Amino acid sequence: MEHDATELRAAAQAVAGRRAPRRGAEPAADDPRLDAELRRLDRLAGVGLLAAEAAHEVRNALTAVKTFLQLLPSRGDDPELRGPFLALASEEVSRMERLLDALIEQARGAARGGNEGGAQSCDAAVAVQAVAQLVARRASERGLHLAVEVASDLPEPAIAGDALRQVLLNLALNAVEATPTGGDVRLSARTLGRALELSVEDRGPGVPPALRQRVFEPWFSTNEERPGGLGLAIARRLVEDAGGTIAIGDRAQGGARIRVRLPIVA
């Protein structure tokens, strides 16, 4: 998060009960109480953002649990439901627990970071297939065709498995919401030089070039009737924390295409 240092110091002085500095005057740089208050305000701002992100991701993770419970009465004896899908729903519950643990650690003042504590990697093919399973029912309910194309022998990207699943799930859910009935959503993964490229494509109205950076801002929406969310903002943060890039372009024959490129583990 980016903060204006002068404004934060002025806020810290106000909270600490001291008089705010006159316009143009610099607060004392060596005041330990002011520095402590500044650090506290910064940490609280981080907690607030992470809490919003956690709430957003918990709602996404509940999709798997809700789907499992809805299917259980009619397909309780289905081996696929009680096997792979049950495991997927259980993993989403575990992911929710890890998200909330991260929020608690942030509130305690611990350092936040998606890939801190050493290099991380994951199986990208597993992440793509898991996300495809998570959004398949929603796509079917909306009359959409969901296509998945994963190249063989994908290298491991330098990102934690939870983070990659978060990125793909946010992008896939947005794609499903943007695509009208009868359209198709496509998830794909391939090797591109020394990077892994993941693409999520929809058949929605697309994103005008002038707005392709703004859509990654928290709460921004291109639809005046529907408030914006955090999905794309979370995706960009996680991708950039891993040293990757994310960009929006046009899909052939209409729609949007979001491409994520991540460095691979050497």
Image (spheres, grey):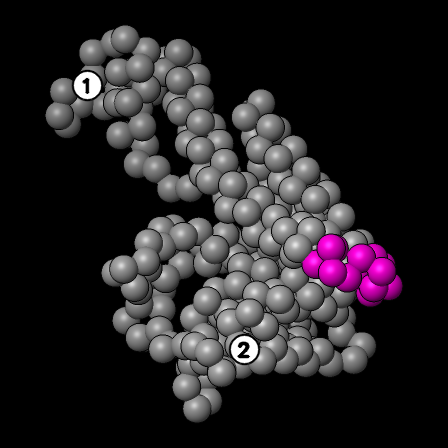
Q: Quadrant of residue 34?
A: top left
Find numbered disc 1 in the image and state the secondary structure of the residue it sits on: loop
Residue 54 in the magenta stretch? The answer is no
**How far across and down, in percent of the image, does residue 86 sit?**
78, 54
Q: Quadrant of the C terminus?
A: bottom right
Q: Quadrant of residue 27?
A: top left
User: From this viewpoint, which residue is outermost toward the left?
Assistant: 23
Residue 166 lies left or right of residue 46; in this view the side is right
Compared with 184, 106 (above or below) is above
Residue bearing the label numbered 1: 21
**How far across and down, in percent of the image, does residue 98 sit?**
68, 39
Q: Nearer the viewer, residue 27 or 48?
A: 48
Q: Is residue 16 visible?
A: yes
**How far across and down, in percent of the image, does residue 239 sit?**
56, 58
Q: Main secondary structure of the magenta part?
A: helix
Residue bearing the label numbered 2: 144
Q: Is residue 249 visible?
A: no
Residue 106 lies left or right of residue 11; in this view the side is right
User: From this viewpoint, which residue is outermost toward the bottom?
Assistant: 253
Marks 1 and 2 sit apart, C-alpha to C-alpha, by: 59 Å
Which residue range is magenta in the image? 71-84
The reply to whether dot 1 and dot 2 touch (C-beta < 8 Å) is no
User: Label 1 is placed on what type of residue?
Assistant: Pro
Residue at 76%, 48% in the rendered image: 90
User: Label 2 is placed on what type of residue?
Assistant: Leu
Residue 74 in the magenta stretch? The answer is yes
